[in-house]
Image: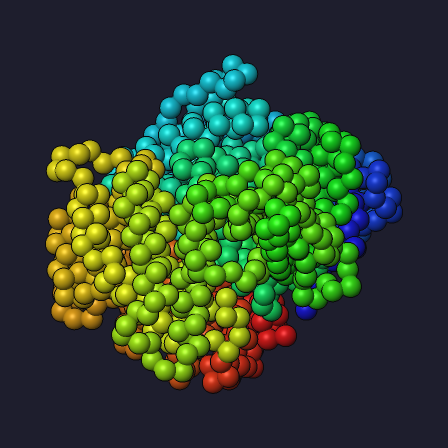
Amino acid sequence: PTLIRLEDYRPSDHLIDTVELDVRLHPRETRIVATLALRPNPDGRSDAPLLLDGDDLTLTRLSLDGEILDPAAYSATASALTVHEPPRQPFTLTIETRVDPTANTKLMGLYRSSGVYCTQCEADGFRRITYFLDRPDVMSVYTTRIEADADEAPVLLGNGNLTEAGPAGQGRHYAIWHDPHPKPAYLFALVGGRLDRVSRPFTTMEGRPASLAVYVEPGKSDRAAYALDAIARSMTWDEEAFGRAYDLDVFNVVAVSDFNMGAMENKGLNIFNDKYVLASPDTATDADYAAIERIIAHEYFHNWSGNRVTCRDWFQLCLKEGLTVFRDQEFSSDMRSRAVHRIGEVRTLRARQFPEDAGPLAHPVRPRAYAEINNFYTATVYEKGAEIVRMLRSLIGAAAFRAGMDRYFADNDGRAATVEDFLAAFSAETGRDLSDFARWYERPGTPVVSVEGDYDAAARTYCLRFRQRLAGAEDSPPLVIPIALGLVGEGGPIAAACERVGEGVFVLDRACDEIVFSGVDERPVPSLLRGFSAPVRIEMASSDADRLRLLARDTDSFNRWQAAQSVAMRLIVERTRADAPPAEDAGPDARAFVEALATFLDAEALSDPAFAALVLGLPSEGDVANEIGGDVDPDAIHRARRTLRRQIGQGLGRRLDSLHAAMTDATGVAFSPDAASAGRRALRNAALDLIAAADEVRGGELAATQFAEAATMTDRLAALSTLAAIPGEAREAALHAFGVRYADEPLVLDKWFALQAMIPEDGTISRVAALQGHPAFAITNPNRVRALLGTFAMANPTQFARPDGAGFRLMADAIRTIDGTNPQLAARLLTAFGSWKMLESGRRTQATVTLGEFASAGGLSRDVADILGRTLE
Ligand code: HT7
Ligand code: ZN
């Protein structure tokens, strides 16, 4: 494959100051006239030809400074337009192209989704609309005239502010949008369609009035209220937390039903996957509400971290994505419970980024080369990128961090920046050299920090020895790892002195180091990596008793949860490895664990239900596989985990029934999606699941009652999920009832598809195959595909990695089909094979055979070929 390399970056030879677009929307033949004000870039080559990017374009007319261009002066293909000897002074190029939005199944460029025209230009979709310098360091001021049939598309939206609108004759109308902020082409957007609107006013801290609006499919505006409110809350939060105000007269969000990702931060016109906009108590779970809030915030925050300050090139993607994830995490933590949210973030990181970093698709947070940039919107760039920003804040402190951010925005406003520009702002603010810290951007892999503790009762000292290692970087200088820590005694935290620990953080910046606490009167248990202060694995030999002391006594909520997870993980891994089937008797270790959980629940469940629900949740089968790391047998993991769940359920006994009852709202209590109410539902449903794990009959009955009586989607879906794990008629009846009730609700049916795709039974493969023929399933709709096939591959390890290879084949067949219409979606699904090398040899062979056949069939898109090539490497 042709690789694009960071080291080959050079500035564009030409710049485009203004872009005037005239777009005449038509379902099959949309005409685009682009008038570009070009000039040679003083930083580029002066004698260079003008080389504009295109993708699947048809050129119908070309003129330069108003004169039709002689065909000998240029060459045009579907993927490039070259003007051989462009003027050496500013000039205007007018390009007319035709595109077919209906035939655009890649969902990049201009396409139609359920009759609504919309665009997706990141990373390189603008070149599917017109020929352009489609690179983020070419920034222009856009004016867009959109014309459409007034009946087909009464709503016409563009970037920036509306300057003019009116009839255009013959039943057509037009709107002109002007965006005063120079931007790269990837932030361009337009929308045309029949849409309902909800709106509200907002006044920024600078006194600027702005109208906020959410546009949705007709008839769905009552489901847009939460998203609209989340926009206003995001704006206020960014003003308070980062001093960033909005900068246009309008902020529009449009929900569409066919979308490759979650949402897109186009300037002033965010386009969303409708899954992350539409919510009502009957159709959305608490997790959906939280995701809507987070993604609305994320895209809004891009207005500064991404749009006002954009990326010089796509290698700097983490500059906007990692930073914006960090910002949305902070927002959600402020809106909800910080501790609970942090645990969720780390679970995601470990479930998605750690395996990526440990497998064939590993890459640095700032990659050095790519074949297809769309394959680098990864957990590493986003989630690990956010962790780097978080570590930076720990290192320099919150006040210096805020000052550094202010400086970064001020110094780079209106510019296309780099990771170096970002770090330079913090260096300038603190006087600190951050070049060692910058290694985090360059090194793939998850570092391991091994720790030994040594208590000297006579000297009343406690010594901690640290060693860091990173596979593949053995000869490279060490990373700078902030480790938040403390000591915990029998009765709680120990106040002991250590001069190397400032603000509770020790900075490990050597390969090995040790620190000594003095004045320690009892053997302590160290609480390491509090709040998950760095994206590393900690290795330390410690007993369950020590871990359970942390669960009971630590002040750091994250480590209390981590302690319970670690004990559960040890028990599951040990049982997975044991040749014999897990014993019926829980054994002393599991009994001690259950006792600790019981004590914890008795003391704290009622005061913090959301946290209690998390403590009750065991590591997922995927987490266990990642922990084991090699020769993985998903069936053995599944059995071991199921047995431990049963033993916990049995051990907690009636306590779970009491919790289930105590967390049930009295009839008539109004629904609220807030964190406290969601926490009660989370604990209620965690209890239900454990009751069923202990006793399928009783749990099944309770779940069936909850399913029938549920007042919220959260409770209904949780009951259905519990029932889904119990084979039999009750399950099939409930699945049927749910399918009928929500037959006209595609987003709800996605939950139903996903739930069935997750059933860890042999029959699931035929169930999934059959569901692909369900009338509500559409192989061209990314949400449907992700719900059914994505869930099967990513969240059903026993069935995806079946020993007979049928799961792999089902996915390979589907991916081949999808690659024919939507390569980006196909490539993303293929990443499910990224952990195949971790499997035991039989399954590994099956994966190699399937992937080999897949490769030899040929005709693959660049997106899929790139993932496949790296997966097989
Ligand atoms: N910046 C966006 C990333 C993106 C995207 C969005 C929708 C469709 C295709 C896309 N390719 C890349 C979304 C974000 O991270 O905010
Ligand atoms: Zn983003």
Side (left or right) of 641 relative to 324: left
Tell which residue pokes out farthest to the top in this image.
Answer: 207
Residue 175 placement (x, y as % from top left): 48, 30
Q: Which residue is at a point 13% across and 34% down the rendered structure image? A: 668
Residue 719 placement (x, y as % from top left): 21, 55
The way the protein has been coloured in the rendering is: rainbow
Residue 468 in view, yes or no:
yes
Q: Which residue is at a point 18% across and 65% down the rendered structure image? A: 695
Q: Which residue is at a point 47% across and 72% down the rendered structure image? A: 816
Residue 793 placement (x, y as % from top left): 42, 68
Q: Is residue 767 above or below residue 414?
A: below
Quarter of image, res 152: top left
Tell which residue pokes out farthest to the front in this image.
Answer: 458
Q: How many marks?
A: 0
Side (left or right) of 689 relative to 3: left
Can you say which quadrant of the picture contains the N terminus? Answer: bottom right
Quick one: 389 or 88, which is closer to the camera? 389
Quick one: 226 or 138, which is closer to the camera? 226
Quick one: 333 or 613, which is closer to the camera? 613
Q: Is residue 587 above or below residue 546?
A: below
Residue 263 placement (x, y as % from top left): 47, 45
Quarter of image, res 369: bottom right
Residue 223 in view, yes or no:
no
